[in-house]
């Protein structure tokens, strides 16, 4: 089974509702959500929450279509930041060897493989606090090479200044991934080498340079439901919502602060239903965003993933590997798509969002 050659209806056709039933008016996008409103969504009976999320999804997106992205770690390990979840932090005892930035050609070979496997977006990640100016030429060459293959381009390199953002955008970078990760209140329990404000500043730089924003976070780090409320509140009250919102479930890695702290405790894995609730609230509060099931899918059952799609998730990472940890794998995903009648997304962006 393969993801390739799936023909989905043309965007306009799909938007007509021929296949998906009557489409609802998408309504307007709100950036004035209160924490109380978001908390009230989380607290709804589960079925009521899904019953709200699915029509929002169908009003804004093509039902049954899921966008496919592929990740590549272009610079692995040895990162000076102390993110408590991350195997690549120099503070972690994960046994990961620090590597140099990959050659441009090797990155382009991996991108060509991702395209051949049916992926629409290629996301390159580096274990840096921020890129150095000496790396910029190689990074720009990677971006323009991947773009020339007809793939959407995404990078996640840590903090950027405005000049770096402009250079990457000019080279053809479509998306920049930079996560807020959790609530402002819980942030310092997870990371101490940078602040929430640092993150927001980089978001402003690449938004201003014209790139699309990919910004989400992680659940299952021992945070409370109020922290998950605060996390989605921070995203949904940005002046413009991120175009992509990755929702990661913590992959507990041995030797990381969080992996070790949570091991063997009831918090070691986010409750599946709470994870689906988080997806649904993201969908309702940020209706135009692509909501991506990101890390943690490897250990998620098919039924949970199906509930996530029902709750409004419409994007996944494909392949056997994320950056350093395992992923569900293309044959498992193709089998799940077949069972659920899902198709790889062919369109680039939600039409309604583009029309705004
Ligand atoms: N160094 C860059 C940065 O932090 O912005 C880019 C790479 S970083 C690995 C990208 C994102 O991966 C993090 O923001 C975090 O949300 C997610 N992540 C990292 N390790 C994870 C883990 N063990 N489980 C779940 N998500 C993880
Ligand atoms: C995101 O939010 N999730 C992806 C992507 N952005 C770069 C990364 C997940 C990394 C999971 C841990 C690992 O493989 O090292
Ligand atoms: Fe470094 Fe990013 Fe990992 Fe944090 S999440 S330690 S910034 S690679």
Image (cartoon, grey):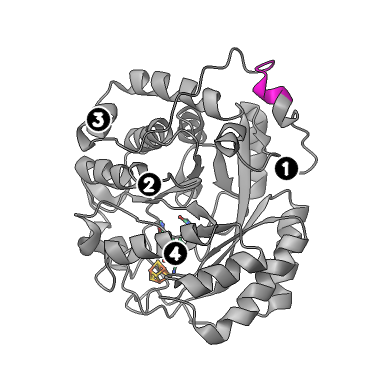
The secondary element bearing badge 4 is classed as helix
The secondary element bearing badge 3 is classed as helix
Q: Mark 4 or 2 closer to N-term?
A: 4
The secondary element bearing badge 1 is classed as loop
What mark, if any, has residue 3 been given in the picture?
A: 1
Q: Is residue 228 above or below residue 81?
A: above
Q: Nearer the viewer, mark 3 or mark 2?
A: 2
Q: Which residue is mark 3?
A: 37
Q: Is residue 17 magenta?
A: yes
The secondary element bearing badge 2 is classed as loop
Residue 121 drawn at (x, y percent): 65, 53
Residue at image point 36% right, 19% down? 47
Q: Mark 4 or 1 closer to N-term?
A: 1
The reply to whether dot 1 and dot 3 touch (C-beta < 8 Å) is: no
Q: Which residues lie in the magenta part?
A: 13-19
Whether residue 150 sits left or right of residue 207 in the image: it is right
């Amino acid at each position: 089974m393969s993801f390739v050659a799936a023909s989905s209806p043309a965007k306009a056709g799909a938007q007509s509702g021929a296949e998906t039933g009557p489409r609802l008016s998408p309504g307007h996008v709100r950036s004035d959500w209160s924490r109380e409103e978001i908390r009230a969504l989380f607290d709804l009976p589960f079925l009521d929450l899904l019953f709200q999320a699915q029509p929002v999804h169908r009003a804004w997106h093509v039902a049954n279509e899921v966008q496919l992205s592929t990740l590549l770690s272009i610079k692995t390990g040895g990162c000076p930041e102390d993110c408590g979840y991350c195997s690549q932090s120099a503070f972690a005892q994960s046994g990961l060897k620090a590597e140099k930035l990959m050659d441009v050609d090797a990155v382009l070979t991996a991108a060509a493989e991702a395209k051949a496997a049916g992926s629409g977006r290629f996301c390159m990640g580096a274990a840096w606090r921020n890129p150095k100016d000496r790396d910029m030429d190689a990074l720009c060459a990677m971006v323009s090479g991947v773009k020339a293959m007809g793939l959407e381009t995404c990078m996640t390199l840590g903090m950027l200044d405005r000049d770096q953002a402009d250079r990457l955008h000019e080279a053809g970078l479509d998306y920049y991934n930079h996560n807020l990760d959790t609530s402002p209140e819980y942030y310092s329990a997870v990371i101490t080498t940078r602040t929430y404000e640092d993150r927001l500043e980089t978001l402003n730089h690449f938004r201003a340079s014209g790139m699309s924003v990919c910004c989400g976070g992680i659940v299952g780090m021992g945070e409370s439901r109020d922290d998950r409320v605060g996390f989605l509140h921070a995203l949904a009250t940005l002046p413009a919502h991120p175009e992509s919102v990755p929702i990661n479930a913590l992959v507990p890695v041995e030797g990381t602060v969080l992996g070790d702290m949570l091991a063997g405790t009831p918090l070691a894995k986010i409750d599946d239903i709470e994870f689906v609730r988080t997806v649904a609230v993201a969908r309702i509060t940020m209706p135009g965003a692509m909501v991506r099931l990101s890390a943690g899918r490897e250990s998620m059952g098919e039924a949970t993933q199906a509930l996530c799609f029902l709750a409004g998730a419409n994007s996944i990472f494909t392949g056997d590997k994320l950056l350093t940890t395992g992923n569900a794998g293309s044959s498992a995903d193709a089998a799940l798509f077949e069972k659920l009648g899902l198709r790889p997304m062919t369109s680039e962006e939600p039409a309604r969002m583009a029309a705004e």
